[in-house]
Image (spheres, rainbow, N blue to C red):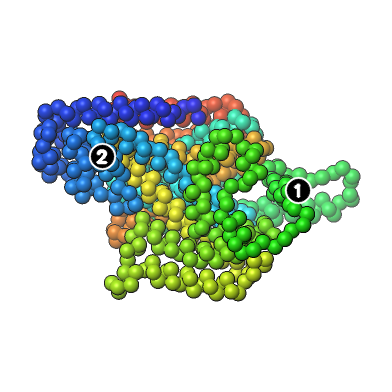
Amino acid sequence: MKKMISVSTLLNLLVGTLMSQDATSDLSVHTTRTGVPVGGGSLNASLAVMSQINNNDECDHVMNINATDRCAFVKNTPDCSMEDGFVNYLQVAFCLLPPDLTPLSVILCIIWLFFMFVILGLIASKYFCPNLSAISTSLHLTHNVAGVTFLALGNGAPDIFSAIAAFSRPHTAGLAVGALFGAGVFVTTIVAGSVALVKPFAVPSRPFLRDVIFYMVAVFWTYIILYRGTTTLGETLGYLGLYVAYVLTVVISAYIYSRQKHLRNSRIDSLPHVQGFESSDTYDDDVPCLLAGSDQQEYESEYRPLLQYPESTSQILLSSLNPVDNRKWRRKNWKWRVLKVLKTPVEVILLLCIPVVDLDKEDKNWRRPLNCLHLITAPLMCVLAFQSGIFGDYLIEGQFPLWVLTLLLGLFLCAIVFCSTTNECPPRYHPIFALLGFLVSAVLISAAASEVVSILHMLGVVLSLSNTVLGLTLLAWGNSIGDCFSDITLARQGYPRMAISACFGGIIFNMLFGVGLGCLVQMIKTHGEVQLEPEGLLTWILAGSLGLSLVLSFIIVPLSRFHLGRPYSIFLLVFYAVFLIVALLTEFGIITAA
């Protein structure tokens, strides 16, 4: 990760860029990108320029306006209105503080951006994924089906919802393309290379080739759509169909393999028993034995009181709303404690709104007072947060607020469940709370992803950067950094094959569902085709780099007999460094098309 730009360097670059742009804008005469002169201190001159600029690109020229007129320009320009977020970050950047303190406003937005990434990871890891696991267990799905469907959705939720949010506006579609391709390059080089560097291993040949081939098909398909600049409904459904084909291939392959393994074991059992002979299979060497769960249970039982007294309803509610584990608090260092203090208010709100069902626990994580309260808060949160609060002011028949009706229905259900259940025993319909938690967490992830896209769009306008470069750097890093750490941790614990499988399986899902579902949602809204306009040479460098990395892996790994060692990992890390340098040089105009 040393190749990434540090936070301090990024902030220094930001302040310097803003100061230089402010100095340029204070001259008596300015020239926009279209070559139109702008008067130095007159808003009327700025608005005159605005009328001559293409309506689709008006807001991108705010940095060419005098610093004192930017706030009025942003407020009076329809193109600067951000319809898909709770906050208009362009107005925050230019109107929150005086013009001389605009860099401080932007820095505050960047800090809020990092905090939004923390919220995304928190919702996905503690609420979205556990409820998906409970749903898949309740439906009795096999591990293979659950892994390529529910688990992939849980791990890729931030990427998917970020792509859907980005495709919702033509200006931010480049964010989705940059993020999906950038995350693909990042995961297949940095993450895969780090896994191989930490723990060299032999990758299973057939699953590896299967994943690489499907991913190359998805990338090539996206490349064709970008070249044409538009996508039809059939092509969009083809993305989703390709992922269904991938899931069927995984399931059928697992079935054939398990059947062959069963036949082989039955033949061995029919032979005379020889002491010391045990069958083994390389495919199952990397399956964890789930000792961590038993260790956690033993740890909890060690601190369990000898005499247990039933807790009252109020005690259960208060303990359920406490996100801090006292034992863990004493063991952790000060950095973890500071981050925990910052996250605690958000965690309390999430605990109030999102139910979590844990089928591995004896009580299935049943908390009667809190779960009854969830019947009120969860639907209300969905109404207020869905599509950035568009239904918050909705009136049924123009008279009755929708949120009031939701509140009344929640109170009714809460009273029924509270009176018909006990604190000790979860009801039979308790798994339904997992579905409710899944829906609420999905809505909140979508809302947070919309805010991330809006902030990145603001940064692109302020720093005069394209959405593609923001997508392949900040958005791709933010959405993939959690996968990076988790996969490296898996490799250190002795499960490198599982880590490399997660690398490729997750990005296949993100690419197919990110583009497919994002374009499908936009088609439903607009009742027309989705226009994808590549942002110059950078988009083709991004797509070409991802395709080249996959082709090289498809060639090099079989030639090395499917052994991923340190030379291969170093090659991947160098490849990403070269790609990032070329992408940034292209963005700043040093590398141009002939």
**Which residue is located at x 43 percent, y 68 percent?**
407
- Left-right relation of 518 to 549: left
Could you say where residue 143 lies in the image, as x and y percent from the top left? Answer: 63, 54
- Left-right relation of 358 to 85: right
- Quadrant showing the C terminus: top left
**Which residue is located at x 62 percent, y 60 percent?**
316
Question: In this figure, which residue is indicated by the disc labeled 2?
Answer: 94
Question: Which element type, helix, strand or loop, lies under badge 1?
Answer: helix
Question: Which element type, helix, strand or loop, lies under badge 2?
Answer: helix
Q: Residues within 10 Å of mark 1 (few under 14, many from 20)?
A: few
- The answer to which quarter of the image holds residue 543 is top left
State which tag comes first along the sequence, 2 or 1.
2
**Which residue is located at x 64 percent, y 69 percent?**
422
Viewer-side residue, 519 vs 426:
426
Could you say where residue 306 lies in the image, as x and y percent from the top left? Answer: 78, 54
Question: In this figure, which residue is indicated by the disc labeled 1?
Answer: 302
- Left-right relation of 76 to 514: left
Q: Tell me if residue 229 can be seen.
A: no
Viewer-side residue, 217 vs 157:
157
- The answer to which quarter of the image holds residue 499 is top right
Viewer-side residue, 275 vs 291:
291
- Asked if 366 appears above or below 291 in the picture, the reply is below
Q: Which mark is residue 316?
A: none
- The answer to which quarter of the image holds residue 426 is bottom right
- Asked whether disc 2 touches disc 1, contact meaning CB atoms under 8 Å apart, the reply is no
Q: Tell me if residue 542 can be seen.
A: yes
Looking at numbered disc 2 in the image, what kind of residue is underneath it? Phe
Could you say where residue 58 lies in the image, as x and y percent from the top left? Answer: 20, 43
Could you say where residue 345 lies in the image, as x and y percent from the top left? Answer: 49, 48
